[in-house]
Amino acid sequence: MMDKITTREKLILRLQEISEKGILDAEYADRSENMHRLFMYPAMMVPATQSAIVQAFSDILPPNTYAIDPFMGSGTSLLSCIEFGFNVFGQDINPFAVLLSKAKTTVYDVSKLRTSLENIRNRILLDNSTTIDITFSSIDKWFTKDAQISFSKIRRAINAEECIDYRNFFWVLMSEAIRVGSNDRTSTFKLHRRSFEELQHRNIDVIQKFLSIAVSGISDYEMFYNKLKKEHNSSELNFRGKAEISWGNSQLKINSKRKFDLLLSSPPYGDNHTTVTYGQTSYLPLQWIPFNDIECPYEYLRTTQEIDRQSLGGKIDNKSLEEKRVALFKKTKHLKDFYLNIPDEEKSKYQKTIAFIADFEECLKNIVEVMQDDAYYIWTIGNRFVGGREIPNAEVLQDLMEYYGINLFFKAERQIFNKKQACKNNHSRTMEKEQILIFHRKE
Ligand SMILES: C[S@@+](CC[C@H](N)C(=O)[O-])C[C@H]1O[C@@H](n2cnc3c(N)ncnc32)[C@H](O)[C@@H]1O
C-alpha cells in the first residue's frame, strides 16, 4: 500500500513537472520526426506530448508491459509506447487507420524498402498502358482522367510487390499522393471538390508526387527507427516489443485476449459526421487499395459516409435512445445535469451527443474487461461545442471511469494548436483545449 502511494506520488510529481514546463502543449516540439508525415490523418495526437507522458511511466510499469489503444487512429500513441519498449495492441474501426498503423509499427529493412521503391519506380516508368483499373461512383468527380491513369500505374506497380507488409507501406504513401493529387480540397477532412476554376489551373504530376512522397516516407521511417536504436543503444530492433494491429469496432469487442497494463488513447469527440470525418478522409485512398489488402467488410467502403456511420455516435436509433439515455444518466451525473439544464425545445439538438456518449460507454465496458486491475489509463479528451454549449466530455469520462471503480489521480489541460496543421505553418492556428486525464484503480 505504502509502496503504491509512493509510486503514485512519484508519478504526480513527474507529470506536474511536464505540465509546468509546457511540454504537454508541445508548441515548439519538433514535429518533423516520427513518420507522422506518411499520411495526414485527422486529429493526430502530438508525438512529443504522448512520449513525455509515457516516459513518466516507463520505469514504473512492468518490464514486459502491454499497452493498448482501442481508438488507435494513425498510431501516434502506439509509437510513443514503442519508443519506451512496450508491447502494443491497437484497434480501430477505420480500415485505413489499420493500414497506417501497421505501416508505422512494422519492422522493415530500410534497404529492402528502398529496393522495393526502385522496383516500383521502374515498373511505373515502363508501364505505357492507359487502362484505368478501378471504378467507383463519382470517380470522375474526384480524379482527372490523367490522374486515374497514373494512379492505376502506381497501383499495379505496388500490387506486384510480393510481401503484404511492404505493399502496406507503399499503399499508405500512395494514399498521401491521392490526398494531395485528387480533386478533393486538403483544407478540410470532409470530401469537398475544388472549384472548377481552381482545377483548371491545377497541374499535378501524381507519379512524381508519389515518388517524392515515397522517398521522404522511407527517410522518415528510417529516422524514427534510427532514433529508437540510438536511444536503446542497439544496432538491432530486437529491444522493441511486439506490435499487434487489428481492425475492429471497440463498441462490440476488443480483439485481444490479453490483459493490458496501460491504456494510452484519445477517443473521437463525437464529431465524426461534421468536422473530424475520419471515414470520409479515408474514402478515396481506400477505393484505390486492392480490397484483398484491406481488413474490413466490403460494406464499409461502399459510400463516403459508411465508416463514419459505423463509428461511435454514427447511428441514432430513436427507439433505444431514450432507454440508453436513462441508463447513461445513472452512470454520469455531469451528463445528466448538463442535459437537464437544456431548455426542452433545444434538447433534440443533443441526441447525437447522447448517442455518441452511450456508444463510448459500451466501448469502455469492453476496455475495462481487458485491463489489468492495477492498469493505468491515460486518456486525452477534447472540448466540443454543440448548439453553443460546451459538452463536458472530460467530466463525463471521469464519471464513467469512476462507475467502473477506476479513479482519476492526475488531470492537466493542454492548449492545442490546430491538430490538422501539425506539420504546417503557425499562421492559421486555432487554439483549443484538451484534457489529459490519468486514472488508476488502486488507492
Ligand atoms: C482521435 S482518433 C485516435 C487518435 C489516436 N489515439 C492516436 O494516438 O493518434 C479517434 C479514432 O477512433 C476511431 N473510432 C471511432 N469509432 C470507433 C469504434 N467504434 N471502434 C474503434 N475505433 C473507433 C476513429 O476511426 C479514429 O481513428
Image (spheres, rainbow, N blue to C red):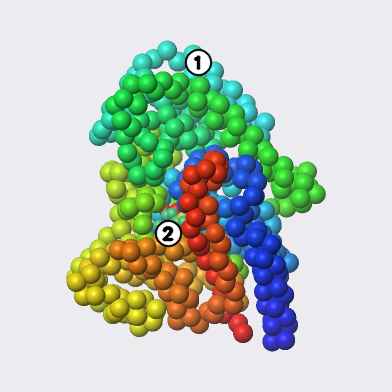
Tell me the tag on residue 268.
2
Q: Residues within 10 Å of mark 1 (few under 14, many from 20)?
A: few
- Location of the N terminus (image quadrant): bottom right
Which residue type carries mark 1?
Answer: Leu
Q: Residue at x 30, y 30 (%)?
A: 195
- 292 shown above or below 363: above
Q: Position of residue 433 (x, y in %)?
A: 50, 61
Q: Residue at x 59, y 23 (%)?
A: 118
Quadrant containing ligand 1 reads bottom left
Q: Alpha-carbon distance for marks 2 and 1? A: 41 Å
Which residue type carries mark 2?
Answer: Pro
Q: Quadrant of residue 293?
A: top left
Side of 394 relative to 230 (left or right):
left
Q: Residue at x 64, y 50 (%)?
A: 28
Under 8 Å from ligand 1: the CB of mark 2?
Answer: yes
- 235 shown above or below 243: above
Closer to us: mark 2 or mark 1?
2
Q: Foreground: 397 or 62?
A: 397
Q: Answer yes or no: is residue 135 visible.
A: no
Q: Position of residue 376 (x, y in %)?
A: 59, 71
Q: Residues within 10 Å of mark 2 (few under 14, many from 20)?
A: many
Q: Position of residue 242 (x, y in %)?
A: 62, 54
Q: Residue at x 50, y 40 (%)?
A: 39
Side of 401 relative to 8 (left or right):
left
Say whether marks 2 and 1 touch (CB < 8 Å).
Answer: no
